[in-house]
Image: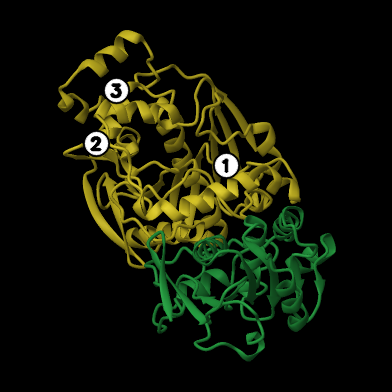
Amino acid sequence: MIDYLQHHRIQLALHTLKEGRGLALLLLHGLGERSPSILPAEYTSWPGPVYALDFTGHGYSTIPVGGGYSCETLMADVDVALTRIGPSTVVGRGIGAYVALLIAGARPQRVRGTILLDGPGLAGGGSTSNPYIPVVDTAQLAPPDPFAIAELATDGRPPTYATYFAMLAEKRSDLACPLSVCTFEIPDWLSAVMDATSANKTTLEHALKKYASQSPA
Amino acid sequence: MRIEQKHLRRNFLYANKAPMNMLTVDQTTDESRFFSFPGARAPDRQRRVDSSGVSLAVYEWGNLDAPPVLLVHGALDFARTFDVFAPLLADSGYRVVCYDHRGHGDSDPAALYSWVTDERDLLAVADSITMQPMPAIGHSKGGALLIHAIQALPHRFTRFACIDGMPFRSPHPDSAMHERKYMTPEIIDAWLQQRHTAAVAERKPGSLQELAHRRARMNPRHSMEWLCYLVTQGARQASDGWRWKLDPAIRPGGFGPFRSRWMTDRLPGFPVPLLAIFGTEEEPMGWDITIEQIAPFMPQSGRLVVVQGTGHFIHIERPQETAALIIDFLQS
């Protein structure tokens, strides 16, 4: 089932992969991907409902005219979804992992644990910003929006910026370890996060069990 | 690098806050008097440019076959704020081309706004003028956009004049201190909350004079007559009053990881001659930068000019003198 949520001039597609009660699990896809249409096997043991969100310009969500993407806009996509589904554990692949980190720092009361997975768009454009204006191949079929591919693969992700959001999450969450890193790829921003916080490498299975067990009554 | 101090005479646009003058502006019910302003001239041509599906309003002053110069406005502004300044350049033999940024003035609003799309829009307008390199002038954010665009594509530009738009917001090095100051939890929360309501947000209607007074909070050095003229160009009139055209989804200030020092650190290698003009008086839209801060980053060929007694809108407070400075720079 897909519900459409309004985020500014965008209609966001929120997929319900499993209905239920209790703490929700929210899946965020990687750059250029879309949400799974059925519940992936690794999440079948999650005790509560499971949702997946198509980011702006991806899957069944609106493709905006003329680009303008940022990870902060995708963070706001997630904020709109969390407003609908309530407190959730957030699992992000690739760029979804970076966005999950941002929303964990921005909304520590709504995000009950963040799990970072490998996937497209994890690194972004690196630690700084090159004076570069991406040329977009608009002849490509969409979705995904070619502007999203061009702009979100080249955005700067300063390690200090990512660390700041991780510290906000750690400082303001009532979870002992709100961030779980399950990636093999460790870009500079993630390395800095792991150096500065309690975010440690673990497995997806372990992280899911940990956050499910800490679900508020 | 040259640093120059200019002590220029005040002219008619400098803020006149005399109560009698304010009273006269506020008391009148004849709005037609505000549709003109001494020295202001409507563009000679208007056209539209498509930038990746977003339609931009483009304005030109001067002969079509004159040497072109691209003029870029600042945040929350619009092209017609150059109605006095641009004709002065045009009358000196230039084809002056300006445009409304997306979501500003008569350009289309967009679902998303970003620094890169603003630069892409700028280049779409540049492409519509000429594929040859040309000079450019930017005010405030328009200057910062041009600095980044020129650093990215130096072969497209010949000279650059920057009117209080040199990037130097934070003295802090690349550390978490930057975020603690500019991305507090409260700022993040307010930004996210605004995303929830932006789709249905509308500009508040009011009388022409009320809109002028609202703008005066951000532009306190402008005269009420000038601000009222700006309303006639930058707002729309409906049955319930005037509303600024600016997309209500657009918020002042940046949000995100972008650091102005990414551009500042590259200034010593800036690829074209650079004239940077500064005022001396602080005001809300100012960039909080002094020549002492930026001077170490300026290229050897750069020229810094300080116009004493002006604020952020130097070209509006002293249009003739600013135009003369820039024309001299373009022709040198």
Q: Chain of mark 2?
A: B
Which is closer to the viewer, label 1 or label 3? Answer: 3
- The relative height of residue B120 versus residue A212 in the rendered view (above or below) is above
> Would you name the residue on which mark 2 appears?
B242
Whether marks 3 and 2 lie on the same chain: yes
> Would you name the residue on which mark 3 appears?
B225
Q: Neighbour class for label 3 at 10 Å: few (<14), some, many (≥20)? A: many
> Would you name the residue on which mark 1 appears?
B166
Query: Looking at the figure, which quarter contains the N terminus of chain B?
Result: top right
Q: CA distance from mark 2 to mark 1?
A: 33 Å
Marks 1/3 in contact by CB < 8 Å: the verdict is no
Q: Residue at x 57, y 42 (%)?
A: B166
Can you tell which quarter of the image residue A122 is in? bottom right
Name the spot of residue B185 as percent of width and height, x first.
64, 48
Q: Chain of mark 3?
A: B
In the displayed structure image, the side of residue B194 where residue A124 appears, left or right: right
Q: Amino acid at mark 1?
A: Met
Q: Residue at x 43, y 23 (%)?
A: B221
Q: Residue at x 40, y 19 (%)?
A: B15
What is chain B's hue in the picture?
yellow
Can you tell which quarter of the image residue A192 is in? bottom right
Q: Amino acid at mark 3?
A: Glu
Name the spot of residue B332 as percent of width and height, x first.
48, 40
